[in-house]
Amino acid sequence: MGNVQEIKEKVKIFFASPVYSTLVLVPLLVVVILVSSAVFLAVEGTEYKWTYYDAAYYVITSITTIGYGNYTPSTTGGKILTIFYIVLFVPLTMLTLAKTCQFITLGAKYLWMKLFGCLGKRNANCKVENVSLPLIIPVLVLLVYILIGSAIFLVLEKEQVWLSYFDMLYFVFVSLSTIGFGDIFPLNKDGFPFFVIYIFGGLILVAVCINVGFFDSVNTESERKDEDDKTTQNEEAQAIDTT
């Protein structure tokens, strides 16, 4: 019984720490992608001539829920495998993105604290967890990320001569929002490594914006209420002492 409780505590500590969980989950997700690509290649590659690139592209667009639709399983085995794969590894991907988001947010808050301190906070409460990172910072980073990424994709996909810079902006936006209509998708296999890194990086940045914009504001409001309650209690206590 004691061992079970100890394991539960260790698991709780692991998931509570963005640093530890990120260092474990990211390599685990990479291994899952590499192995899954090989499995899908074995299932789909023989009959429908998928390459490892095709399988990896399908795996990544599936677990990120982008799903452009230009690669789909054609065999019964591939379809059954896809169902189990999505059920098992989409949650793993979301968890990995969430923990990486928390890790990056903590790093950004630490840097902000070192540069500007805890604005509006007392020195005793000047901790990384109490730092309020301005939403404009991650939003601007994401905007620049989208603009530069669109230009790079335009260069990488120059064989699709009908695509304009605006088309690439549209492609990047629908990809990072995980809508993935499928009317525009990458064809240049040489640019595939950039595509993978860019998509995961962009999804993490979007998560950072949501984390800073929503959860931090909620936490800050909760902290203010706690401080106001403490101030009120102290004033009441002082009033009682004076009487």
Image (tube, grey):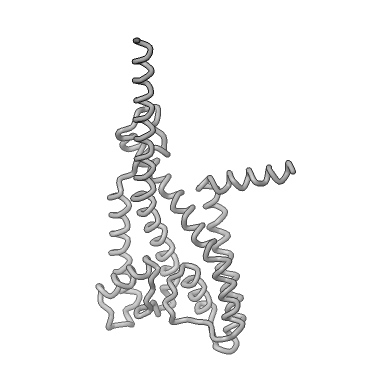
Residue located at (58% from left, 64% from top): 31
Quadrant in the picture for the N terminus:
top right
> Which residue occupies the foreground of this view, 217 or 208?
217
Q: Is residue 239 above or below residue 231?
A: above
Residue 42 location in percent, x, y? Answer: 61, 80
Q: Residue furthest front?
A: 243
Q: Is residue 14 above or below residue 181?
A: above
> Which residue occupies the foreground of this view, 124 or 160?
124
Q: Residue furthest top?
A: 243
Residue located at (55% from left, 51% from top): 21
Q: Is residue 75 left or right of residue 156?
A: right
Q: Residue furthest right?
A: 1
Report the number of numbered marks: 0
Q: Is residue 114 left or right of residue 60?
A: left
Residue located at (53% from left, 58% from top): 26
Residue located at (42% from left, 50% from top): 104
Q: Quadrant of residue 38?
A: bottom right
Quadrant in the picture for the C terminus:
top left
Q: Is residue 223 above or below residue 33?
A: above
> Which residue occupies the foreground of this view, 154 or 178?
178
Residue 133 location in percent, x, y? Answer: 33, 44
Q: Quadrant of residue 113?
A: top left
Residue 184 location in percent, x, y? Answer: 35, 78
Q: Quadrant of residue 191?
A: bottom left
Residue 222 location in percent, x, y? Answer: 38, 39
